[in-house]
Structures are given as C-alpha cells and as structure tokens.
Image (spheres, grey):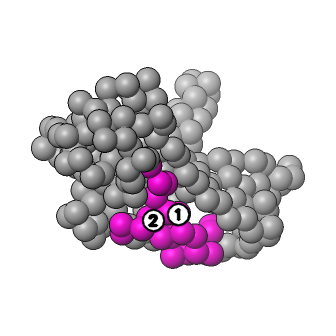
Amino acid sequence: MKLAIFSMVFLLLSMQEIYTPDFCASMQIEKAGIYYDGGNALFPASLHLAFPRIYIDEDGNAESLPKSSVEGNISFLQVDGASYRQVTLKIKFRPYLYDHLIPYLPHYWEGWGGERIPYVGEWQLSYEEENTSGWEKKEITGAINPACMKGVPDELLADADFNGSPAAFWNYEVFSR
C-alpha cells in the first residue's frame, strides 16, 4: 500500500509543467528581420537578426540558401530569487526549403512570386541555474513562425507549402546574380 501511495505521489510530482518562456511575445518581424525587445526576464537585452541575403540567377536557381543567426550573452542574472549564469539567447533564420530540395527551387520560385523565399526562425536559450547541488546546465528552444507571433504584416506571411495557412515568413532579401 505504501509503495502504491509513494508511486502516485512521485507520478503527480513528475507531471508538473516545466516552465517554457515565450520569447515570441517579445519579438516583432519586419522586412529587415526579427527584433527581440528584451521583454523576457531570462534575457532582458535586445537583439536584431536580419534576413540573410540570397542570390538567384535568371532561371530561379541558387547555389545555396543561407542561414543567419545572432546571439547575445549575459554573464550573471537574478530573477525572482533564482540565480543564472552564462545566459545565451540565440536567434536563427533558416530556409523553409531544405538543402536537398535546392535543385527544385526553380519550380517553387514562380509559385512563390519570383521575388522572395520563405524562411522560418528558431530561438535557443542556454544557461546554468543554481540549485542546492551547484550549477545545472539547461537549454530551451522554440520555433519562430507566424503562429507564435502577433501583428505579423500580411506581406511577410508565407504560405510556403500552398495549404492556405502561413507556415513561414517571406524573405525579400533576394538579389539577381
């Protein structure tokens, strides 16, 4: 009987929700890129990530679709009585189209309007949190897409998979080579 009660208590304690910060709530997107305003207590500094430049030939071909990232670091931070160190926020852009599909880019290019490429983002927070046994390393990641952001300008909403729902952001940093 004691074992059953102990097991149930352990199960209930292990089902507690793990806090995941909402960095998208502190981000805005525009044609130039993403701006994080420092609105989250776990990373109270601003960051800006520009969309990567893409070079396309007259047939809609590209040698590669570049990625971009920016990161900020805070050496020590206290939030609500908890201590954190080596806090790093990284924001990344990657093409919606995976590398192995680049040979098919000309087929997508016209359907996407011939002047833009869809991109999605990701944020990654890594830090060490002080607890009773020392410092514990933690890492949390999340997607940056139209579903997680408010106020995305219509011109940036990319229905990249042609299903009627925006799944990415349009990158207009596209140039002829």
Pinpoint residue 50: horizontal percent, then vertical percent. Answer: 50, 63
Task: Please tell me how crowded label 2 is: few (under 14), some (14-19), or many (20+) other residues with Cα within 10 Å.
Answer: many
Residue at 62%, 67% (x, y): give it.
42
Q: In which quarter of the image is residue 157?
A: bottom left
Residues at marks 2 and 1, CA–CA distance in whole angstroms: 5 Å
Check residue 53 for magenta coloring: yes
Pinpoint residue 106: horizontal percent, then vertical percent. Answer: 28, 32
* Drawn side of residue 119 relative to residue 44, left or right: left
Q: Which residue lies furthest to the right in this view?
A: 134
Q: In which quarter of the image is residue 101?
A: top left
* Drawn side of residue 133 relative to residue 91, left or right: right
Check residue 89 for magenta coloring: no
Q: Which of 127 and 79 is in front in this view?
A: 127
Q: Residue type at mark 1: give it.
A: Leu
**Mark sitting earlier along the chain (2/1):** 2
Q: Nearer the viewer, residue 27 or 101?
A: 101
Query: Pointer 2 and pointer 1: residues touching (CB < 8 Å)?
Result: yes
Q: Which of 98 and 137 is in front in this view?
A: 98
Q: Reply above or below: 13 against 92.
A: above
Task: Characterize the magenta stretch by its predominant secondary structure.
Answer: loop
Could you tell me which secondary element the residue under label 1 belongs to?
strand
Residue at 36%, 69% (x, y): give it.
30
Give the magenta range.
Answer: 30-54
Q: To which residue does mark 2 refer?
A: 34
Q: To which residue does mark 1 refer?
A: 49
Residue 62 at least partly seen: yes
Q: Residue type at mark 2: give it.
A: Ile
Q: How many numbered circles does the render carry?
A: 2
Residue 143 at least partly seen: no
